[in-house]
Image: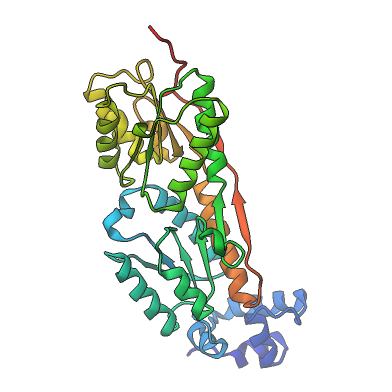
Amino acid sequence: MTNTIKDVAKKAGVAPSTVSRVIADSPKISAKTKMRVRAVMEEIGYYPNVHARNLVNKRTNVVGVIMPSASYAPFHNPFFPEVLRGITAQANEGKYGLYLSTGQTESDILEEVKEMVHSRRVDGIILLYSTKADTVIPFLLEENFPFVIVGRPPELLEDTVSYVNNDNIKAAKMVTEYLLLLKHEKIGFIGGREDAYVTLDHKEGYYQALCEAGVSVNEQYLVYHDEVFEGGEQAVIELMAKQDPPSAIIVADDLMALGVLRMLQSMSYDVPKDVSVISFNNVLMSELANPPLTTLDIHIYELGFQAAELLREHIQTPDLPAAARVVGHRLVRRSTTKAYRNE
């Protein structure tokens, strides 16, 4: 026989309405009463009907997570499992489930987001990408639907949209300055999607560091490819085919950097003796690379955790003003960078 709220109330010596408020974690109920009621619930094996409660509250207790379009192979990149790990940890704390979505194209993503919003399948959305021509952000703003970006929105919307991001200009400036301190001046730049704000910000930081050091920007040293292993291979072929190839390379992503290292090795370049390589993200494979990869740790888990936390706040308080959170970074020096020697 299934136990009911009335059974819990009777055994705990409280009214059924009090049990309902304990289940909803109402601040009007004392901690002592909550402990007593929860102890009885556990003792008799009573589990609340979450679906019924959500119908009353007009909530699903589900968060939508939107990946980049499948054409950019997001599941190939270890950034996404790690950011999802952070999102999941926070979602579990708030007893939220996740609805993971990725479309084959940008238009597929927009259509699925529209369906999620109009059918009220989720309470809020986390976007794991941010690009210049994105159509999802304007739609979500128009619908006044809770959402948070991992990345940053367009400059005109920075006071309107909540987001969690690194200071990617400062981060790219740091890695460029590090190579400059190692006496490199011919520094290549391998960016990811050219329309992604993270790429634009990395490029800006790269420019700033070179200009402040009095080093001319060589536009031939800038190439862009998808953030996958093969993208790194193709990009480094382009760079090293230049008449005067770079002595150091900044790579947008660790997975791309592994492709860079593999291709440099196949072309008989010694890393870091002939070419220094530095990357972003500090995923596990960067430490296991051969040689171990110098990279910038952007605390991916924390990006996901804080994005989920911020979205939860917006779901619980719909009128909450837009907020921006910036997660720090740190340089992890390993074996792919070395001082330049003109031999």
Marker count (numbered): 0
Residue ID at (44%, 58%): 130
Q: Residue at x 44, y 31 (%)?
A: 217
Query: Residue 9 vs residue 73: left or right?
Result: right
Please, which residue is most extreme toward the left here?
266
Residue 182, placed above or below residue 288 = above
Position of the C terminus by quadrant: top left
> Foreground: 273 or 247?
247
Q: Position of residue 75 (x, y in %)?
A: 32, 54
Residue 79 vertical placement versus 99 (above, below): above
Of residue 6 and residue 294, the one placed in the foreground of this image is: 294
The image quarter containing residue 238 is top left
Can residue 98 be seen? no
Asked if residue 68 shows in the view, the reply is yes
Along the line of sight, the residue nearer the viewer: 49 or 243: 243
Q: Position of residue 154 (x, y in %)?
A: 51, 60
Relative to 232, does residue 303 appear above or below in the rendering? below
Residue at 30%, 49% in the rendered image = 76
- Residue closest to the far top: 343
In the depicted structure, whether residue 16 falls above or below residue 229? below
Q: Residue 128: x, y in percent?
A: 44, 59
Colour scheme of the picture: rainbow
Question: Taking 226 as reference, is 146 left or right?
Answer: right
Q: Position of residue 335 (x, y in %)?
A: 43, 22
Kindly identify the residue that appears in the image at 38 percent across and 19 percent down: 272
